Amino acid sequence: MVSLSANGINASALFNDENASARADLINRHLALWQQLTTSGRGGLVGAFRDAVTGEPRRVDFRHRVDLHRVATLGHSRGGAGVTWQAADRNRAQWPEGVEVRAVMALAPAYNVMTEDVSAYEITKTPVAVVRGTCDGQVGREALAFAAEATAKSSAGFRQLEMPGANHNYFNTQWSPRSGQVPAWDDATHDAAHPGRCTDPGGSPYAPQLTEAAQRRAGAASLVAFLRCHLTDDGSR
């Protein structure tokens, strides 16, 4: 698994489709770097790896070791909009040569549903899954409807999951209170009459709130199950 930093985009003044487009471009640029690394052992990623224990630079030979015909993308919040934009039918031509995205998961995707054109996100050839918590205080159920409409003509499949007791921020270690980061917070809606339970601003039923660790475990389990369906040949469904 490779994680991309989008802090530069987060700090920019991009809005609506431009934000999703910039994130998609970031994904494609990194896939191109990996394509170069795995085919020739050259490119911008050479020398960028470090030993997980010592932190010292480590040269790793990735030639012919990464199957870029079996790529899956995962994005959280605005990143969720980015991965669906990258997989949209009209944007497939921007994928680097030799790369095939075979599965997309949008985790609590933050679409600007009032201003963004759903037709620009139309996906008919790539399986898509969307996960949203019932205690999400930042992304409403309209995100599920938006993604469902974008994949309405899909022959590849669309899955959606509402995770009871999950909020928006706990999927992200940096946005969770235990990270100690200043903007980290619990975005769920609480009521003294329902201790230990949470809901969203839309008034979904109160559910026992998941801890940070439990929510991330549940998210990881959903991701692994989805990827096994579409990236492996073991017949898991």
Image (tube, grey):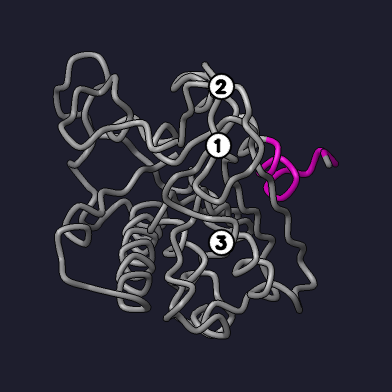
- Label 1 crowd (10 A; few <14 / some 14-19 / many >=20): many
Q: Is residue 220 visible?
A: no
Q: Earlier in the sequence, mark 3 or mark 1?
A: 3
Q: Of 89 and 9, which appears nearest the observer?
A: 9
* 226 left or right, relative to 51: right
Q: Tell me how far mark 3 sits from mark 1, CA to CA.
A: 16 Å
From the top left corner, tell me how far across and down residue 122 is, in percent. Answer: 61, 79
| Residue 173 percent across, percent down from the top left | 34, 30
Disc 2 residue crowd, few under 14, some 14–19, many 20+, Cα 10 Å: few
Q: From where the camera sits, is residue 211 visible?
A: yes
Q: Which circle's residue, 1 or 2, is located before the other in the chain?
A: 2
40 lies above or below 61: below
* Residue type highlighted by circle 2: His
Q: Position of residue 104 (x, y in %)?
A: 58, 57
Task: Name the kind of residue labelled 1 in the image.
Answer: Thr
235 drawn magenta: yes
Q: Which mark is residue 143?
A: 3
**Above or below — where is 185 with respect to 75?**
above
* The magenta segment: 225-236
Q: Nearer the viewer, mark 1 or mark 2?
A: 2
Which mark, residue 194? Answer: 2
* Secondary element type, mark 2: loop
The C terminus lies in which quarter of the figure?
Answer: top right
Q: Which residue is mark 1?
A: 199
Residue 106 is labelled as none
Identify the mark nearer the N-term, 3 or 2: 3
Residue drawn at (52%, 17%) of the image: 195
| Viewer-nearest residue: 106 or 192 | 192
